[in-house]
Structures are given as C-alpha cells and as structure tokens.
Image (cartoon, rainbow, N blue to C red):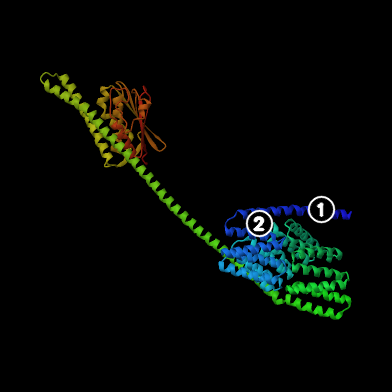
Amino acid sequence: MQNKVQFVRMFVIVLFLFKTAGAQQKTIDSIQQLLNKEKSDTQRINLILQLANIHRFSNTDTSTLLATDALAQSKKVNFKKGEGFALHTLGIIQEFQGNYDSSFHLYQQALQIFEKAKLKKGKASALLSIGGYYYYQSNFIKGADYMLQALRMYEAIDDKEGQGASLNNLGSLYNDKKDYPNALVHFKKALDIKQSLNQGRTLASTMLNIGNVYYGQKKPDSALYWYQQSLANALQYENKRSIATARSNIGNIYFDREQYPKAIAEYEVALQIDQDRNDQEGIAVNLINIAHANVKLKQYDKSIPQLKEGLAMVREIDYKFHEQNALKYLAEAYAGKGDITNAYNYLQQYINVHDSVYTEESNQRVAEMQTLYETEKKDKEILVLNKEKEVQRKTNIFLIVLAALILVLGLILWNRYRFKQKTNRLLADKNTELQRLNATKDKLFAIVAHDLKNPLSAFRSITQNLSDNKLQISKEEIDFFISRLNQSANQLYDLLQNLLNWAISQIGKLPFVPEKISLVELAEDNTRLFENNLMQKKQQVTVNMPDELFVWADKSMIKTVVRNLLSNAVKFTPEGGQIELNAREENGEAIFTVADSGIGIAPADLNKLFKVEEDVTAVGQSSEKGTGLGLILCKELIEKNNGRIYAESTAGHGSRFIFALPLAAN
C-alpha cells in the first residue's frame, strides 16, 4: 500500500514538472521570438539577459553562455547597463555554484560600472549581492552594511522588487545570528512584496527562509509546512537550487525527529541535484548533513571521511558557518569512537571558528546598523510628514485668504446691491414725487381751467349785461345780478383761499399753532357762513354734538377743513336736502362727521378722493363739479394735526365725510 502511494506521488510530481516545464518553455520561446525580430543592439542584449536569468535556476551552463554573450555584445556597443548586469548575472551563477571569491570580483566589477554610469538600480543590486558575499563569509557587520545600503537605495527609487530581495537577505543574516523575531519580520515583508509583484519564481527562497526561522525556534511542524510550500513552488518553476535546499531542509526535520534513514534519503536527493549543478556549497552542506546522520547511526567510519570531505570544501569556499558545523560533528564522531585526542582537537577548532562568527561586537554592530537604518527611515518619514504638514499649512493659509477674499468680495457685492437698492428706492421716491408734482401741476391747471374760469365767466357776463343795459335794468334784475355777483365773488374767495393754503402747505410754511378747540362752536361758526346758500337751496343743517367736546388742534386749519366739507355738502346736496354735523368721543379721539342726503358717490369714485393724482371732475352725477382741491387740502391739514380723514358713501343714499382728531386734555 505504501509503495502504491509513493508511486502516485511520484507520478503527480512528474506530471506537475512536465506542465510547468512546458509553461517555462513557452516563456523562453516567446523571448526567443522577440530576440529573432529585434534589431536594436541594446534591446537584444536585454532579451539575452532575460533568458540568462531564467536559465540560471535550472541550467547554469546555458545561463553562463548567454550572460557571457550579453557581456561581449555590451562591450562592443559600449552599452554600460548591459555590461554591468551581464557581470552581475555571471556573479550570481558563480555564487550558485559556491564560487564565492569569483562571484565577489564579478559583483565589484559590476558595481564600478554602475557607479560610473550612475545607474542606481544596478548599483543597488550589486551592493546587495556583495552584502550576500560577506554574509556567506560570516562577516555579518559588512554583510548588514551592504544590504542596508542596497535597501536604502531601492527605497529611494521605489523599486519594490529590489526591496523584497534586500529584506530577504537581511532576514537570512538575522536568522543565522539567531535573532528570529527580526528575521521573521524581514522575511514576511519580502514575501508580501514578491506576492504583490507576482514574482512566483523567487518565492521559493523566501518560503525556505521563513521555514528556517521556525526551525530555529524549534517549531518543526511550522518549518515543515513552509519547506513543503517552497518545494512546490521550486518544482513549478524548475528552480533546482531551491528544490535541493528544500529537500535538504526537509531532511533536517526528519533528522530532528531521529528518523535518520529518511533524513539521509532527502539529503542524497539534494546532493545529486547540487552535483548536477556543480554547486560546491550545496555539495559540501549535504555531505556534512549525511555524515551527521551517520554519526547518529553510529557509523563513525563512514561519517568521518564524509565530514572531512565536506570540511575541505567549505574551507575552500570560506563558508565559516558550515565549517563550524563540520568541526563540531567531527568532534562528536571521534568522541563516539573513543578517540578523545582528535575529538578535543576538532572541538577546539569548532570553538575558535564559532567565536569568530558569533562575537558580541558583531551582534552589537549589526544591531547598531539596523537601529541606524530604522532611525534614518523614521527621520525620512518625519521629513515627509513635516513636508505634508507644511503643504497642509500653506493650503490652509491659502483657503483662509481665499475665504477672506470671497468674504470681502461678498461684502463689496452686498454693499453694491444695497447701494443699488437704495438708489432704486430713491429713484422710485423721486418718480413718486415727480408724479405727485406732475399731478399738482395738472391740478393747478384744472383749477385755473375750471374753478377760476366759471366764476370769472359769470362775473364777466353779469358785468357785461349791466354795462350794456344799465338804463333798462329793473330793480328785480339788479337784485338778481348783485346776488349772482356776490355768489361768484364768494366762490372766487374760497377758491383763492384754498389755493393759498395749499400752496403754503406744499412749501412747509403754513403756520401751525395748536390749541384747545370747541367743535360745537366751530360747527356753528361755519354754518353761519353758508346761511345764504342754504336759504337759496332750501337746505336744512343740523348740528348734533356735545358742548364739552374739545380737540387739540390748529383752529384756523380745522375751520378750513369744516368749511370745505360743509361747502361740498351744500354743493352736492339737491334743493330741500338735509345736512348733519355730528361729533362724538371714541377711543380717545373726537369723531367729526359731515353727512348729506345727496346722490352719493359710487365705490370706484370714492377711492379717487383725497388723491392729488386722481381726476375727480367726473365724480358723481351732480351738475355741480369741482377739482377736489378742497378735499386734498383737508387731508393735509387733518394729518398735520395728527388726525385722519376718510369718506363713506353709497350711490343714491348720500355721503359722509369723517375726520378724527386727538381730544384735548382736561
């Protein structure tokens, strides 16, 4: 049953590899087609370097040939960017094969080219790779320094891919120093960046590193999960280096669980892949791991040659981290054999190498550099924040100034609007005044044309008759003519008196001397003035008001008002009609009424009274006509005495003219 399961698993892996290999081949074919069509030398070099970087994970020989070709073509056309990245790619290939010194020299050459050409991205990639070299040499101080330089530069040019690679390498450095919290933070940041950029091919190494952190923290289940994730990703993209590393790390899990045969099986698969790739570091590490498992199985004679071979290889590539492991395992193997001398010798060598790798100064310096980087980052963030605050402050000032300008503009517009409204009101008032003056003019013309014309015409006609027939006029005719002359003279006098008073009131020169007035006396005095008129028209006047009713007003003005109202009543009341003068006290006022039994006034005509702009010559059906000047004068005189005047009438039922004045104090 177990063999069947193993067969199925192998079949699935082979099928998976076939599919992913096909996908990768499609990418290679696509780039190859572009390469065949491209005529630009620089673009062709860039495409060749893309192919070299794809092949470096699966076939280092092909990758080396392509990168070497790109380097030669770049030199030929003086394409510094292509030259620098070709050298950098060759350095990575040498690093994959464990040739660290060769890779270091290639990285330095690339760095010099990038610096001269001022290519920041290239410079950052070279700095990161040099930092990796020092890390492999267990020179953590220099390693951290170069890696942090690279990270700063990638952040400055906002290169997320480069930031992810830098964080990944820094995480490895912290992990080797057993600073697991810092290592995990850096690895997970790197993983997030790579996933956001959809960099599937590079995820395997970061997943391996996360697994290593959990392995160092003695959390084997979590470590195994991440190793398996890394292996699946590496298989998908034919990343042979990561496949070998993942299998080796899975072997470490089995080793810790004391399942040594299973551990050796994983190590041997990894060893075979590294031998095919000619990866000296991988070969050495897997030899040491296999030997260590054999030590645990007490196969000392088998393990000691393997350890010595692995030790020689890591010393050749100067990889001190694995050198100390090989020395420790040799001491353990010799101790198992009972060879105390060799055990002590290798143990002493292990202590010396271990102390050179993990020194307090090293830990402190790396921590200081990390603190410096974090401080610089915080300072930059503070600088950006301060700039944002300054921009916000300036924006706020601008908005305040803008609001103030809008407010000032609003006030100006409001003042202009108010000024315009005021001007319009003044113009309206002036227009009203002009209309009133125009009506006054028309009124004066109407008076001259009507009220003056009729009595003067009568006066002229009578005198003309008297002159022409002075010897033939009888006594009765003389009496008649004298009566008519007297009537005309009285009309002219009243008209001129009204005109005079009105004119004086218009210019504000009419004297105003208020006093206590008896209304009954005022009514009786005015009635006596119209005795002849009343007798001729056989009219009756009734005065009906209390003797003790007094008002506070100008006597001359109120007398003029009563005279005008009574004159109109006599004029518009037919022969034999009735006229009543009434007065009463009501709400602190004296209400004076002149009522007649005339033909009355229609409502439409009633509204025209007391208005200078209205033509009242056609008001009513009486043959008696007037200009309405008397009523206008009455209104002005009553209002000047703080009173009010109005009329009530119904056509065919007479009229009532009423004014109210303040009562006089007792």
Q: Residues within 10 Å of mark 2 (few under 14, many from 20)?
A: few
Q: Residues within 10 Å of mark 1 (few under 14, many from 20)?
A: few
Image point 67% across, 61% down: which residue? 53
Q: In this orientation, which residue lies closer to the viewer: 624 or 642?
A: 624
Name the mark on residue 11: 1
The three-letter amino acid code for the residue at tag 1 is: Phe
Image height of 39 relative to 179, above or below: above
The image position of residue 294, as x and y in percent, is 86, 69
Name the mark on residue 197: 2
Earlier residue among tags 1 and 2: 1
Asked whether, in this view, residue 384 is left or right of residue 637, the answer is right
Image height of 533 relative to 77, above or below: above
Q: In this orientation, which residue lies closer to the viewer: 254 or 370?
A: 254
When asked about the image quadrant of residue 261, the answer is bottom right
Name the mark on residue 332: none
The three-letter amino acid code for the residue at tag 2 is: Leu
